[in-house]
Image (tube, grey):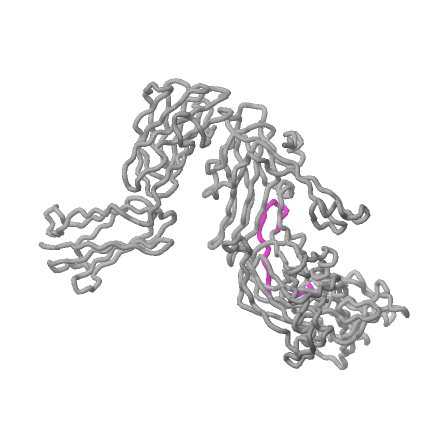
Amino acid sequence: MYNILSFARLLSLCGLLLVGFAQPAPAEELRYDSARDWRQWQLPLGAVELTPDGTIKPVAIHKNINAALGGGIRRVGSNPSAAPLVLDGDPATGWSPDPQSPREDWFIEIDLGRAISAYRVNLVFDQAAAPFELFDLLLSTGEHQVDVVDVPIEGTLVYRIVERYKANGRHRVTFELDQPLHTPIQFVRVANLKRVPGARLVEVEVEAFGDNLLTGLLERGGFIDISTAIEMESHTVTLANAFPLIDGDLTTRFVQKNEPRASFDVHGHITVDLGGTYGVDHVRIVGGVVVRHGFRFTEPRGFPFRYYEVLTSDGSLSPDGTRMWTKHFGSWSSSAVHRRGMADHFFPATPARFVRLRWRVWDAACAFGATERDGYSYTTRSCLVTGRTEELQIFGEGYPETAVLKSPLIDLGAGKNLNAVRWRADTPPDTRLEIRTRTGNQVAEQLHYRDKNGKEITEKRWLKTPKSLRGRVDTTLTVGDDWSLWSKIYDTSGQNFQSPTPRRFLEIEARLISEGQAAALDWLAVDFSPPLADRALGEIAPAEARPGEQTEFTYYLRADGTAVDFDRLAIESTAPLRFDRAYIDGEATEVETAPTEAGFDLGFPRRIGSGQLVELRFTSTLFQQSTRFDVLLEDSRRDQIRQRAEAGDANPQIASNSNVVRIPVDERLFGNIEFSTPALTPNGDGRNDVLIVEVDLFHILVPRPLTLRIYDLGGRLLHAEQRAVKAGRQTLVWKGRAGGALVPPGLYVVEVQIEGDGGQQRARRALSLAY
């Protein structure tokens, strides 16, 4: 094991605010509040935004955007200071060439910053003057001009789309992009050819499909992985070769380097981790321009895939541990797609963390002779599909459903008692913030081996790689063997710390869950203090109880290595508690008791020292599986310092070693149904005027509908009432009325029904009614 940072160095690395660490203050604070603090965390930037004031909030993706707003000026011939005004979204500002400059300088050239799939380009002119009368609109994918030996000339552009406008009198000129011949594009050039006094171009708009989720993928915490021979010894493509698919550059492309051939079909896949879960509804595959013998053909781009599939996954796993996928397309590509050199796949918005393109790299059946499918002729050469592709584009709408924020591994310098987690967040309806923690006393050193492209590989493969092709080796510190599992989700700010404590090391995970609206996290803090004891162990007996029956329990507590003695204990549980008595080292002790919302507090007449065995006896009725009982140590001289006892062997004579009580496995949702009377007499004499039904509900962790219905013997429903309840004893009341009036004397059927996660359960009993 490796001891990580000193506490002093933690301050410099994490930028934390730690108040009065050396003083025995009631509580100290570890706080993340400013943008500087949050930058120490692993943040999926691009999926979330870190504002200057230190707030973290998800970034929405949009449909039908003006892509020019994210672009910039590449070149301008004259009046360069005004050029950015055509991209500011303000129709009151704009650009016009200097009439004194040479005519060849009357142009402006815009770089959209990435390959854009667009519907149209709009040129907007100043309404207060005549528009440009004669001008050219030019569009480019970013292709460079080449010299006599076909070498691209750096800094040049080839504009294959040129549209001239003559005698123009419109203040808004729209050029419709022919899908897919005119798109994607990256550069827009407007060249004015005739001087018109006062004419001014105020906006250039590029109406695009939407935000491409692959833009900035790696910065957002996503990744791309390509394997080109799954059935054989899979060939993993380097990140350098895969990156052209997501770089937004139409002059780069992915090309498969190996050529697997076999007597069976061989498949490859391109898998993209979006870095978060989004509502995806459109995948576009942009084929590559044909290049042979160093010459770039000017024909439309080709489409490389024959048989392929488009799939998405939200990351859910099947019972065998493999990722579950939803297939949106799986067939042979059509001749129309091959002519276009591009494929668009639209489907209903689907939550997706992963998107996969799976294709047949080698078609074994094809290898035995030419075939024809959908008008496309397949020769033996067509049996191998190299996957030459310029771009993948993925579109959707809305906020990332889940954005995961993870703290650094935090060293508190020594074992500290972690008291509570607090935060401030904005969680509109249909959003939530989920915070979890884990703790430990040990850390381990972990080595990460990388190839020359920065992709992580195994140590064995790294050692086999020639030194000139090896990448760096990164050292990180990770959790040790004694770390706890992630805690349950904290319900409210200020809630008691849920992970084992005291501990030296801490890690925090926060998830912003958004649907329709966005959750935002302002700040987060952990309260901690010097521990009351080096170790406090607790266990409960019996470890199993029958549901719905009162049971007497004994909780055993032993604290070792106490810095100072303590004199207060609190016991908490989701089950109802009734305190009976307490013992210290087998001797009965009178204590002061005070009920609390979660259980009760105990004040002892003398302080409890290190190694003393405390027994707390109480009565409870359990309704849920794995009910937990927590005991917290307190010191009346230091308010708000509490230390939670860990489950462990507090009493060697007890075999529990747990603070959790089980109930026998039972699929029943309720039991112990009791009627206040078998005969209802609603005559106002105070005896049996109402029916009271009491029922014990089991295993209902979140509110579920509990319904009381009254039927006559003909099966007609006379009365119904429903409310949402959780596990525990519930009471239902009927006053013998239906629609406000007393029902006639006779026999009736009373039905109690509960809706559970795994189905519903009901019970019926007969009831007589007389006046």
Residue 140: % across, % down: 76, 70
Residue at 46%, 31% (x, y): give it: 646
Counting the numbered discs, the total is: 0
Q: Of all residues shown, which one is farthest toward the right? A: 148
In this picture, residue 256 sits left or right of residue 763? right
Residue 99 left/right relative to 238: right
Name the residue located 32 percent from the left edge and 38 percent from the top edge: 545
- The vertical placement of 133 against 673, above or below, is below
- What residue is shown at x 61% (from left), y 54% (from top)? 275
Residue 118 appears in view: no
Residue 251 at least partly seen: yes
Which picture quadrant has residue 504?
A: top right
Q: Is residue 274 magenta?
A: no
Q: Position of residue 421 (x, y in %)?
A: 50, 38
Up the image or down, 707 lies above or below 253; here it is above
Is residue 146 toward the left or the right of residue 664 in the image? right
Q: Nearer the viewer, residue 721 or 281?
A: 281
Percent position (x, y) of residue 613?
A: 40, 22
Is-magenta flag for residue 50?
yes
Which of the image's four quarters has the N terminus?
A: top right
Query: In screen coordinates, is 81 left or right of 534?
Result: right
Q: Which residue is nearer to you in this view: 448 or 459?
A: 459
Which quadrant would the C terminus be assigned to in this image?
A: bottom left
Q: Which residues are magenta?
A: 49-68
Percent position of residue 527, x then y: 52, 33
